[in-house]
Image: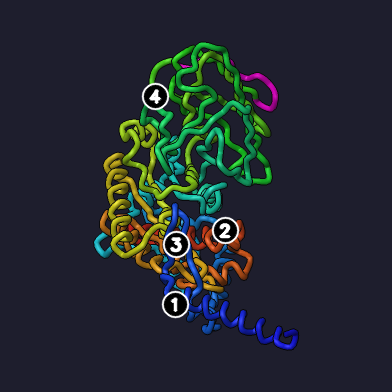
């Protein structure tokens, strides 16, 4: 019998292989779900198909991003006022950028418009050109999912726009950020909690006043007003973040009033500078804390029987440009109509909002099963944009499409099958609402380009998110695209004056 053991082992293995092949033959190629978990099984073709997806050559894209980055580091505004009236601020400033002659590369540095919507950002460009003359800053709000959290992408836009058009400070920050930014480190007492409405409605909240970032923070429950409570927030700004971020001269706290008296103390670099009491009425209140120097650290201490709803702290100065980062992890971007729009409008009007950037789609892609669902998502986005345009008449909106995202098929990572359909639906929503569109998917290199970004170390191994270095390259190309169209606007204005 011992002589036959190798044969038995061979027959046993053959039975196993035949069984697995049978399962692979009948198993649905797309898999199926059990209790919310997707079950999949390799197909027969995957065993015999050793061909890997072709990786995109992104060397030209990265070279252009690096060249643009070096140029913007040295960039100064050209004075073109000799061509027009000296007091016409809307035609004075023109930004240098690299002229791209290769049509294949030109695509990645261009904003896209529906033919009739070529001037979709003109109102913003008009305000941008005159931003240094105004006492109040113009505001850009950058909404997105986890791809921008931690101030990624936004920080580069802010740095360059403030260098060219004035303005100081990082803008609005949450009391409890989901992800810390590079420039700022925040800490807080352990009794704080976060309440949001951008991924799902928080049932604990008895109202819809979630504020400009679809979320707020509290250190007490909504019904707990019987006992004394204390809490603190501490914010440290690093000088290495650059002058435009670290040299703000005022802090504004946006809050909904507590039901009981709450005392607040403000400390600048450890020294008590202000002691006051919060308003006890209204869902849109502002308390300002002026600074005597660029702070290294400031702290807010609260004491009372209730907590305010703190919508955010704005670190800023006077005029120029402010750009706020709202990285909303897990959000599809279709939450605006779930908020109290009248409350939201109070923020937009007060902040002098001139442009809103919407960067969503990635969180919804894994749940989209067919083209019809892509079209539905586009319809949801169109409804959000229309609501924002009603809230802020004349506001310019820039929609950024999803990046390339990869899903594992067998042993290989490939672009999600419906990503291009989703991108097209989002672009159509932008065009149908007279908005501008930036195609981040094509900007990266298109289908299966994420593989190359991961190989280059500029995207994470989840094949979804950029690394900090990758986020900067995208930001450089986005900034260049915006400035290219700004220059076209300035040139058109100049010619009209001649």
Marker count (numbered): 4
Looking at the image, is mark 1 or mark 3 nearer the viewer? 1
C-alpha span from label 1 to label 3: 49 Å
> Residue 365 appears in which quarter of the rendering?
bottom left
Q: Which mark is residue 481?
A: 3
**Residue sitting at x 35%, y 36%:** 339
Q: Mark 2 points at which residue?
A: 472
Q: In which quarter of the image is the C terminus?
A: bottom left
Instruction: Classify residue 397 as left or right of residue 247.
Output: left
Looking at the image, is mark 4 or mark 3 nearer the viewer? 4
Looking at the image, is mark 4 or mark 2 nearer the viewer? 4
Residue 156's spot in the image, x, y percent? 55, 53
> Residue 214 appears in which quarter of the rendering?
top left
Q: Mark 4 points at which residue?
A: 283
**Residue sitting at x 31%, y 48%:** 385
The tag earlier along the polypeptide, 4 or 2, is 4
**Residue sitting at x 66%, y 35%:** 236
Q: Does the magenta stretch include residue 495?
A: no
Q: Is mark 4 on a helix, strand or loop?
A: loop
Q: What element carries label 3?
A: helix
Question: 254 or 371: nearer the eye?
Answer: 371
Residue 469's spot in the image, x, y percent? 61, 60
Residue 467's spot in the image, x, y percent? 60, 58
Residue range (magenta): 268-279
Residue 253's spot in the image, x, y percent? 50, 28
Label 4 neighbourhood size at 10 Å, few (<14), some (14-19), many (20+)?
A: many
Q: Name the residue under label 1.
A: 25
The tag earlier along the polypeptide, 1 or 3, is 1
């Amino acid at each position: 019998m011992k002589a036959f053991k190798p044969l038995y082992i061979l027959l046993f293995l053959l039975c196993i292989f035949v069984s697995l092949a049978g399962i692979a033959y009948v198993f649905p190629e797309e898999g199926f779900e059990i209790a919310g978990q997707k079950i999949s099984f390799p197909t027969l073709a995957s065993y015999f198909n050793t061909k890997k997806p072709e990786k995109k050559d992104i060397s030209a894209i990265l070279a252009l991003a690096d060249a643009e980055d070096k140029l913007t580091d040295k960039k100064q505004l050209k004075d073109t006022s000799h061509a027009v009236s000296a007091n016409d601020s809307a035609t004075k400033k023109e930004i240098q950028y690299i002229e791209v002659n290769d049509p294949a590369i030109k695509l990645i540095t261009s904003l896209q418009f529906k033919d009739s919507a070529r001037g979709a950002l003109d109102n913003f460009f008009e305000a941008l050109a005159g931003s240094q003359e105004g006492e109040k800053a113009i505001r850009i709000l950058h909404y997105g999912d986890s791809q921008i959290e931690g101030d990624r992408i936004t920080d580069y836009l802010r740095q360059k726009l403030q260098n060219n058009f004035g303005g100081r400070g990082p803008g609005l920050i949450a009391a409890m950020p989901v992800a810390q930014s590079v420039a700022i480190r925040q800490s807080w007492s352990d009794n704080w909690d976060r309440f949001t409405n951008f991924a799902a409605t928080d049932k604990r909240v008895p109202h819809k006043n979630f504020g400009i970032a679809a979320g707020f923070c509290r250190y007490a429950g909504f019904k707990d007003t019987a006992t004394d409570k204390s809490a603190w927030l501490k914010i440290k700004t690093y000088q290495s973040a650059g002058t435009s971020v670290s040299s703000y001269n005022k802090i504004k706290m946006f809050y909904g009033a507590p039901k009981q008296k709450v005392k607040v103390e403000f400390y600048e670099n450890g020294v008590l500078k202000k002691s006051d009491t919060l308003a006890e009425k209204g869902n849109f209140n502002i308390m300002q804390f002026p600074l005597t120097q660029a702070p290294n650290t400031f702290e807010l201490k609260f004491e009372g029987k209730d907590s305010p709803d703190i919508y955010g702290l704005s670190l800023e100065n006077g005029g120029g440009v402010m750009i706020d980062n709202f990285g909303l992890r897990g959000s599809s971007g279709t939450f605006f109509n779930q908020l109290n729009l009248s409350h939201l409008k109070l923020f937009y009007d007060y902040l002098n909002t001139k442009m809103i950037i919407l960067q969503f789609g990635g969180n919804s892609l894994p749940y989209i099963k067919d083209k019809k669902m892509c079209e539905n998502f586009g319809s949801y986005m169109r409804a959000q944009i229309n609501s924002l345009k009603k809230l802020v008449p004349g506001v310019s909106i820039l929609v950024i499409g999803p990046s390339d995202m990869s899903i594992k098929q067998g042993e290989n990572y490939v672009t999600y099958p419906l990503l291009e359909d989703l991108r097209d639906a989002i672009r159509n929503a932008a065009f149908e609402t007279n908005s501008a569109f930036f195609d981040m998917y094509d900007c990266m290199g298109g289908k299966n380009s994420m593989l190359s970004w991961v190989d280059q170390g500029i995207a994470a191994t989840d094949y979804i998110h950029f690394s900090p270095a990758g986020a900067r390259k995208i930001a450089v190309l986005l900034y260049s695209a915006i400035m290219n169209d700004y220059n076209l606007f300035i040139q058109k204005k100049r010619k009209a004056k001649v």
